Each structure stands twice: as structure tokens, then as C-alpha cells.
Amino acid sequence: MDVLALHRRAVERYQGYIRSFIDIRDDDIRQEVIAQLDSGKLWPEPLIQFNPAYKIGKSIETLVKENVLRSELAKVFANYQLYWHQEQALRLGAKKQSFVVTSGTGSGKSLTYLGTVFNSLFSTGYGKGVKALIVYPMNALINSQMEELKKYAETYQKSTSSAFPITFNAYTGQTANEVRQEIIAAPPDILLTNYMMLELLLTRAGEEQLRHSIFKTLEFLAFDELHTYRGRQGADVSYLIRRIKALTQSPVVCMGTSATMSTRGTFDAQKKAVAEVATKIFGEPITSGQIIGEQLERSLDWSGTVPTGNALATPIPSEQGLEVLKSHPLAIWLENSAAIIETEHGLRRRKPSTAGDLIAALMETSIIPKEQATTQILDLLRWIAAVNKRQTDQGERYTCLPFKLHQFFAQTGSVYATLGLPKSRKVTLEPGIYEGADNDFVFPHVFSRASGRTFICVHVDQKNARFLPREFNDTDARDGNDFGYILPEYSQQEEDVFWTGSQDDLAALPASWTNISAAGLKLKQDFQARAPREIYYNRHGNYSIAASEECPLKGWFMSAVKAGLLFDPTAGLFFEGNTNERTKLTTLGNEGRSTSTTITSFILLSQLAEAGFPIQDQKLLSFTDNRQDAALQSGHFNDFIRIVRIRSAIFYALKDAPNQTLKSSQLGQNIRQSLNLALSVYSDNPSAFPSEHKAIDDCLEKYLTYQAVHDLRRGWRVVLPNLEKCALLEIDYEDRVENAAFEEGWKSVPLFNELSKEQRAELLRDVLDYFRLEYAITSKTWLVPGAISENIQTIRSKLRPECTEPKELLGITV
């Protein structure tokens, strides 16, 4: 698979998702936004990070011969060639000295503390209680390490034809109660846990036996990902370690690993900084000599000089293997220019760089033009990925100059602009207070979801008769002043005029907003602030209620105090008081972090599927900051999957229907058939008789009908518009065209009787759409409260509970 092509397509699809929400009517703002997006402002060029080769150390067998390690370790880590940092850590561990290993991802750091513990257990005996506590920041890492320990046990068993004598187990919140009881009754030699569970072990009733075993026999305490313990959490962990060491009967060796403990300053300064942190956490003096950093070596054939000039234009033989790659001039140049740098302390990693940086460096070093340099760099990266893929497929542990792509996505924010006419104002995507030499305010601009018209967010400084910038989500009425939006009117041309305050405009307002007087319609006092009020202003934000030379710009002010915007005059829409402001107006984008994560995850997984990866390999790992965010993201993933499935089912139901048309009464049945689910998926009675099977299917069809109707609610999902909003689904009304053509029936209906049958059919659609979208539809079978309650009871009784998410449909809990 071409990882560069995958990355390009993934970014393009994400861009397409973000751009699909951009509906800005003002040309100058839209053009500036598009220019900024085209420049990569929200999705900058990815960073390419190379993983240099780690310096090879002595083998396990050699350390056994030197009497550093027990011979049994050669059977646990059979034919295992150590890296230099692994060797050094095992030497310290064998001497019962604490250490911290700071090496890159994938460098085998866990072997350093596991090998140390195994070596001690083979020396002093096992089965006597907990000898080692290994603490991880996440349960996922514990689960992964458990699998690795099982592999080590299998290797030992194959080498010796006897069972692995060292016992190990995980003790977390995910551990079943019966397994916990077994661990308490017979503590394993190695216990894997997280620091929160370790804290509970020291205090919780019912676990005294395990606690006493730890205090009596513990010799090793290892913390993986040591850099995660900082701030308050780091203080908690340091006190936890001190409490354990104060209560144990034997000295405890502390071990830690991290890939990112320190990256600033010289190599010696980094080791010193890590030693200071480790001293604070472990509660014992840790010297720089106990900090083991990575040592690197070149992956490619090195003659002592970096290739330059014409050598770098050597064609990329992408079909060749590892040996050719190791001697290719451009590959050697890339390793020395982008992966490693030679220092007085040996080879060190270089900082990640972009493809653009590499191309520029190649052009500077050689005589290659930009187009050729681009081709050379990208072809070389593809060749490296292909060679390493072959190495991995052949079971080889070592790869050659592997690299990772780091793509960052910035969250879309507001558009900011000075006040003024189009093309005379300054437009930017950067927040700020002032712009330009005249110190004009920069105001956040948001846009009507329905019309794309501009709404300028303002605070009203009534004392100084001036508009001040207001962030879209700022709803604080400062000093009792008003706040809301300016709707600029740029000219008197028909396309610019959306409100005049005339009687016709007032007649379009809800009847509850107006009174009828002798002079005609008049706004009620309570709603005068809700309708547009004529205002004049200048580019500095000064305003007045009358046009003047000082305030030449015309607009309409709409208050957003209390209930927010209740009326969008640019689209003729009215909103309920509890409607979220972001469902009426939009900033540059709609996505939050959860949405971006879900969308990018979906794009990447779909790319893996399109590339032909087996279903078991179509996987992605997502990290979040804390449990709450992880739970939120998990819910976001599940909700997205559910919505995509129901919409996909609707799509295929329509696709398979005659003339690709369905009646509402057929919706549930056709969706169920397109899903093609086994009965066991949605019923606890998979062996039901045909009559019961049909009743269960009827129940599922009812539920799917509710799901489909629920998903079509107006404004229901801002960041995941429904099929109708995306123009992928068209809803029509039965016999609309035929009824419109029935001239006799319209003779007594004003306006309708003056239209042609085609015009009448179109007007009927508009009227019915208006009632369906703005008000409601009703059905005695489906949508009246009694029918909903009855159908909910049926759904509860016949479908599996886990199949009926979410629990709320049409405002009623299932």
C-alpha cells in the first residue's frame, strides 16, 4: 500500500468534508477563506519523522556467558539480539540498581524491566508472592503487555518442553471478580496494574492478603511511560512510591521507561534533567549514570561522506530490495540529512521535517530542479516503505530507515474582518483586536446556515455609541448593554435588500409578534428588539440611528440577549427560544475535536478497506487525554456508526426499490431487508417459530421506521447532515402531480386557480415541505403519543436492548 497516496486521499477527503459546510455569500470573504484553506492553513504539510537504527548491543547469550544474566533468560528471549540501551539497562538491573530508559518508540524498553525481573526470579526463586509491580498509565497497555508475557512463556516452553515457572497477571478495574479473588488467594510473581488501582490496593478492605504479600516480598517497581506522571498526578505517584518503599521488607529497585522525558539541551543536560525528575518520583537519588538514553547507528552503507551533486539524481530502482537501498546515494543523503546528525556524543535524531523541507534541501545540495527533486524524494519514501514491508512480511525484526507521517488538523474558527464594504475591508482567519495602521476593530463574522448571509457579532457600547467585537459564543451582556448581530446591507440592489421594515415584512412575522392598529401592523413591545432595527455605522464601529457622513454604512441590528436569534430575515426563518445558536448560524466550520477524530478515523479505515486490507487488519488506535474524553469519543464513534448504518440501509433500500422510490409505509420493511441481519443479532430468540419470527421482524421494522423519521428532523445533526440535507434523498408527496393537474378541484382556490398545473405542483411541494420541516407530520399509526408508547412497549419486549440505541426516539424514552 502506498502510504503517501493514502495520506493524500485522506487529507483531500477531510478537506472535502470541511469545505462542504462553507456557504458564504460575500465574495471577498469567501475568496479569502478559500485562499487560506488552499494554502493549508487548517491542514499544514505533514511532518516526516524517521526512526534511525538503534545501536546493536550484545546478545542475551553473550550476557549469559559473562554471568550477567541467568541462563534461563536465553530460553525466554531465544536468539534475541539486544540493542545497546537494553544491554546497559539489564546490566544495571542485574546489580539491583534503579534505572530509567529514555529511548524511542518501538525500541524494546519493556524488555529492560521484564528481563531484570525474570533474571532475579530465576536467581532467587518464584511462587513466593508478588516480587514485581509493573504500573502502566492505561489498561490498554496492560492488556497488550499481558499478550507479550504470554508469548515469552510460550517461547520458554518450546525451548525447555516445560511450563514457564514465573506467574503473572493483571489487576485492574477490568479484571473479573473471580480472577481478583484468585490473585488475592495466590498472588503472582508479577502483577500488572495502573497507579489508581495500586492506590486502592494499599487502602481497600478485602485485599489485605495481597497487600501484605506486596509488602513482604516486593523487590521491583516499574513505571512504564514515566513522562505521563507530571503535576498533581506526578506528586500522587511519588507519594505512592514512598509509601510502598516505607512498608516493604526488602529494598525496592525502581525502573522507569519513557520516549519523551526530555528533548532540550545537550545530551548530558537531558540526562541530568531526567535524573532530577526520576529522583523526585522514585524518592531516592538517581544519577545521570542511571539514565540510559538511546544510541543510534546508520542503517545504510556509510563511506564517511554524504553524496552530493549528480549522484542524488540517480534513478530510484523501486523494484530492488534492501541491499540496493542501503547503498543508494539519495537514501544515504536522506538518512544523514533528515534522520540523524553526528554530535560529540555520537549520532542523534534529527527533528521531523516536511517533504517541502526535504525537497528544498535536495535542490540546494544538488543541481536537481524542483519537479525532479519532488519526484526523487517521494519515490524514495515509497521505496523505503515497500522494502520495509517486505522485511516485515518475511519476519525480520529490523527495518531500514522507517518513517512516520504526522498530520495536524487545526480546528476551524471564525472569520474576522473590519467593518466596511466588500473588497474595502480586511479579512482574516486570525483572531485579534486591531488590524492595520488605523487600529480598526476586527469583528467575528458568522453566516446564516440557510442563506449564507453575513452576521457580524457585536457588543453594544451604548454610552459611547460604538460597536465592539464579540466572539460568537460570548453571551455576556456587559454592564447591562445589548449584544447581537449587525446584518450589513451593502447596496439597494434587489439581491442585497432582505428587510425594509415595511408592512409586507411585518406581515411575514408570526402573528404573536404584531398588533393591528389603524395605521396597520405594529411590532409588540416585547418583540421590537427581535426584529431588525435600522442602524448606521462606520469602519471604526461608531453607530447612529440616522444616516450621516460620519456613519455611512447601513445595516440592521438584531439583539441576541436572553433567547438568542429568534428570526433570520435573510432566509425568512423563525426559531424556538431554546434552539442552539449554532444551528441557526455557523462559523467557518462546524466540527469539534470529537467530530474531526471520528471523520478522520472513518476516512482512514475506509481507505484501508479500499486498499484491500483484510478486515482484521482494518484497525486504528485513538488516544485521548483522559477517561471522560475517551468515553465521549467512544460515544461519538458509536453514534456515527449507527447513523451511517441506518443511512446506508436507507440508501440501498431505495437503490433496490422499483424506480428507486419508496412509500413511507414501506420504509421499515425495505430498510430491514437491506440490512440483511441474522435474527440472532436483534433477538434473544434466534430459534423462533415462523410466526414469532415474523412478529420480531415487524417489531424491528417499526424501530427502523422511527430511526429513519428521527434522523430526518430539521437541524437534528449540524455536523452530520441527513440524506435529504445532503441532496442524496428526495422526499415527495403521493399523487402531488396528479392532484395539481386536476383543474376542477382548484377552480375555487385563489391563486392556485391562476397557475398552470406545473406551477401548481411546484407550489404544492413548497407548501407541504414548509409544513413538514417547520411544523410536524402526524400519523395515527406512528406519531401520536399513544401509538409511540404502544410501539415502544413492543420494541422493548421483542428486540435485544443493545440493538435499540439510542434510548430516546422522538422525545420519548425507549
Image (tube, grey):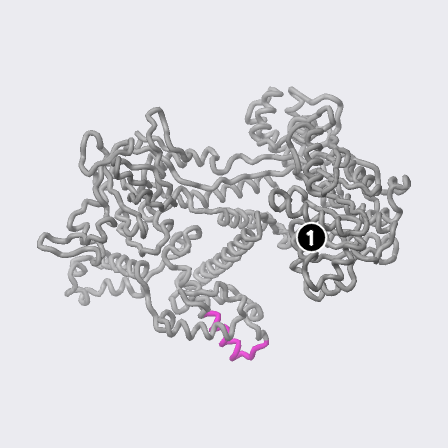
Q: What span is in magenta?
A: 687-701
Q: Is residue 722 above or below residue 438?
A: below
Q: For residue 731, which quarter of the picture?
A: bottom left
Q: Quadrant of the N terminus?
A: top right
Task: Please name the residue shown 74% across and 51% down the image.
Answer: 133
Q: For residue 457, which quarter of the picture?
A: top left
Q: Is residue 54 above or below residue 621?
A: above
Q: Secondary structure at mark 1?
A: helix
**What x and y, as percent, mark residue 436?**
36, 26
**What x and y, as percent, mark residue 141?**
67, 50
Number of marks in the rendered image: 1
The residue type indicated by label 1 comes to Ile
**What x and y, as percent, mark residue 330?**
67, 27
Q: Is residue 319 visible?
A: no
Using residue 745 as the reference point, say whether residue 664 is left or right of it. right
Could you say which is closer to the camera, residue 223 or residue 350?
Answer: 223
Q: Is residue 559 magenta?
A: no
Task: Please name the residue shown 81% across and 45% down the image.
Answer: 116
Residue at label 1?
142
Could you say which is closer to the camera, residue 641 or residue 242?
Answer: 242
Prevailing SS of the magenta stretch: helix
Task: Please name the residue shown 77% across and 43% down the image.
Answer: 112
Which residue is situated farthest in the left direction here? 518
Task: Please name the residue shown 44% across and 36% down the image.
Answer: 37
Q: Is residue 698 magenta?
A: yes
Which residue is situated farthest in the front direction here? 246
Q: Is residue 757 visible?
A: yes
Using residue 493 as the reference point, say whether residue 144 is left or right of it. right
Could you say which is closer to the camera, residue 641 or residue 10?
Answer: 641
**What x and y, as percent, mark residue 811?**
40, 65
Using residue 745 as the reference point, say whether residue 285 is left or right of it. right
Categorize mark 1 by other alpha carbons within 10 Å: few (<14), some (14-19), many (20+): many
